[in-house]
Image: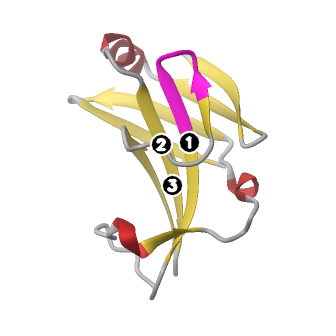
């Protein structure tokens, strides 16, 4: 299943696998998806599920919301997988829409949501 939505004024194509559609239909609460683009010495892309919503989100019906958060490290250069949330700050561009991805793909495998996004 696929949707074309607007997030921060930019087009975003959202594709769900059949397994993801079934998992979404089985939920009793809406799914919140957050794409995070982390700027450090390298760039890291991550997709989080069911975190509290931050900033502007786009809705897909009543079942799913999608957000985007470009961030950077408060100190030093680290791309470690265990970055504490308090070490991240929103990217101070004032124009996060410049970094909104073009596509987001969601899947549900082995009882876990999975996602990837790109440009």
Q: In x, y percent, where is residue 40? A: 52, 77
Distance from disc 1 to disc 2, alpha carbons, whole Å, reads 7 Å
Taking the spot 21% from the left edge, 28% from the top edge, the residue there is 111
Decide whether residue 36 is among the magenta residues. Answer: no
What range of the chain is rendered magenta?
Answer: 59-66
Q: Nearer the viewer, mark 3 or mark 2?
A: 2
For label 3, count other residues whose C-alpha is less than 10 Å away and answer few (under 14), some (14-19) or many (20+).
some
Give the label on residue 53, or none.
2
Spot the residue most to the bottom.
76
Neighbour class for label 1 at 10 Å: few (<14), some, many (≥20)?
Answer: many
- Mark 3 falls on what kind of element? strand
Q: Along the horizontal axis of the image, is 100 left or right of 45? A: right
Residue tagged by mark 3? Answer: 36
Indicate whether 74 appears above or below 108: below
> Is residue 13 positioned above or below 61 on the image?
below
Q: Secondary structure at mark 1?
A: strand
Q: Main secondary structure of the magenta part?
A: strand
Using the image as rendered, state which of residue 93 and residue 112 is in the foreground. 93
- Residue placed at 54% from the left, 35% from the top? 66
SS class, disc 2:
loop
The quadrant of the image that shows the N terminus is top right
Q: Earlier in the sequence, mark 1 or mark 2?
A: 2
Which residue is pictured at 59% across the width and 20% down the height?
Answer: 2
Determine which quarter of the picture holds residue 27.
top left
**Of label 1 and label 3, which has the lower sequence position?**
3
Separation of marks 3 and 2 at Cα, in angstroms = 12 Å
Q: Specify whether residue 62 is painted magenta.
A: yes
Q: Which residue is mark 1?
A: 67
Is there CB contact under 8 Å for labels 1 and 2?
Answer: yes
């Amino acid at each position: 299943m696929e949707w074309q939505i607007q997030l921060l004024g930019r087009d975003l194509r959202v594709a769900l696998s059949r397994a993801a559609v079934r998992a979404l239909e089985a939920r009793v609460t809406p799914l919140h998806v957050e794409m995070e683009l982390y700027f450090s010495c390298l760039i890291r892309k991550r997709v989080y599920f069911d975190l509290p919503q931050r900033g502007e989100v786009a809705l897909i019906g009543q079942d799913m919301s999608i957000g985007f958060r470009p961030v950077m490290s408060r100190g030093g250069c680290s791309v470690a997988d265990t970055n504490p949330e308090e070490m991240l700050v929103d990217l101070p561009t004032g124009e996060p829409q410049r970094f909104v991805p073009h596509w987001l793909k969601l899947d549900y495998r082995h009882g876990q949501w999975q996602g990837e996004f790109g440009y």
